Amino acid sequence: MQSLMFFDLARRNVRLHWLRSLLAILGIIIGVVTIVSMGILGNSLVLAISDSLSSVGDSIIVSPHTGGPGFGGASGSNLLSDRDVEQIRRAAAPHVTIPVSSGSSRMKIGSEDTVGVVYGLKSDDIPILLELEEGSYLRGSSGAMAGARFAEENNIKVGSRINLGDRGSVRVVGILKERGMGFDINPDYGIVVEQQWFRQAFDQQDYNLVIVKVKDLSQIEDVKDAIDRQMNRKETVVDVIDTRAILETILTTFGQISTFTTAIGGISLIVAGVSILNIMLMSVTERIKEIGVIRSIGTQRREVRRMFLYEALILGLIGSGIGGVLSIIGGYAVSMVMLQTTEYLFVPSSLVHVLYGIVFGLGISLVSGSYPAWKASNLNPIEALRHE
């Protein structure tokens, strides 16, 4: 019953000094919205990068070492030979080994000229590495598959013909599903042709890199070591890259960036806490005589402390509650502006930042009100009654 009475006194004081209370609440709202919005943006960024790179997280990439003989490869050039590929395949068995050739070429699509990347892959390897959006996979050696972005930017459809000048022309039999960033190949902005056609068109018999798709992620390190031992026995002739390790490093980095941006948002909430501290100290100064009266009639110190903490709690509840609701709108806005998508907004790992923001807002409010409450409870009742 007494707790309710002191809560009513705190609520009355907030209402009587509504303007400064409103300013304190506004500071909390801004702080909560900032910290939550930054948290949602950081988490959405990590999820977006993770989704974009997850398709290559099970890969090992083998490429010619740039410091090896003749600028790099095991075959004395900056390419990998069929013999090199066979050695890699034996070392990586039973996992799938996919040799890749690549080059760039000027292309004519209809009446438009452009430049694009051309990847040469064996037709059996394409479904393992790439997903189909429209049309069909390569069956013969004269067709091509267009990357999603390349097809969109150049208005390429299934059946379109792409002319590569003196290298010949190919008819598009399929459009690939957008793959996003990758550490191996980026076919979104190019075309994929059959390996044999690539060899004839580009007069290149060897490969630019080899991709090993590991079925069991726990075996990545073992497979990587086996390839390294097989290919780099005497000197380093190939570079063996574990994409999972790169992916983890990137996600860790973006996670740290997310924490940093959230901490920046937290600074504004601390500023709001200073505002509450100032307001509560003003309230104590203005109500010294009132404190003296309630202390003189037997009110205990802890009850006086509770009254002022209730006042800070009311400010924190209102500000954090409104800030939590508005932070959803803020998170939506920053996601649209920075990522052009809101698909990561309503996932648990993003929405939990709303809870963090509200709890932090309440915590800052109570901490800021602690010293004024302590000061009020320790006033001498006689001196407080004499105060003018």
Image (tube, rainbow, N blue to C red):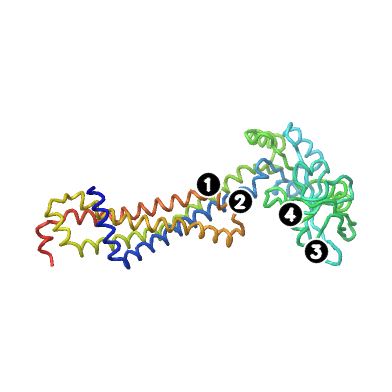
Looking at the rendered structure, which numbered label has been put on residue 49?
Answer: 2
Looking at the rendered structure, which numbered label has been put on residue 348?
Answer: 1
Q: Residues within 10 Å of mark 3 (few under 14, many from 20)?
A: few
> Tags 2 and 3 in contact by the CB under 8 Å rule?
no
Q: Amino acid at mark 2?
A: Ile
Q: Amino acid at mark 3?
A: Thr
Looking at the rendered structure, which numbered label has been put on residue 154?
Answer: none
Please tell me which of labels 3 and 1 falls first in the chain. Answer: 3
Task: Look at 86% across and 58% down and name the residue there.
Answer: 160
Q: Which residue is mark 4?
A: 188
Location of residue 369 (image quadrant): bottom left
Q: Residues within 10 Å of mark 4 (few under 14, many from 20)?
A: many
Vertical position of residue 303 compared to residue 339: above or below: above
Q: Considering the image in quadrants, where does the C terminus appear?
A: bottom left
Helix or strand or loop: what does disc 3 sit on?
strand
Q: Amino acid at mark 1?
A: Pro
Question: Does residue 334 appear in the picture of this structure?
Answer: yes
Q: Position of residue 104 (x, y in %)?
A: 79, 57
Q: Position of residue 206 (x, y in %)?
A: 82, 46
Please tell me which of labels 1 and 2 falls first in the chain. Answer: 2
Give the label, 3 or 1, closer to the camera. 1
Give the label, 2 or 3, closer to the camera. 2
Q: Which residue is mark 3?
A: 114
In the image, farthest residue toward the front: 1
Please tell me which of labels 2 and 3 falls first in the chain. Answer: 2
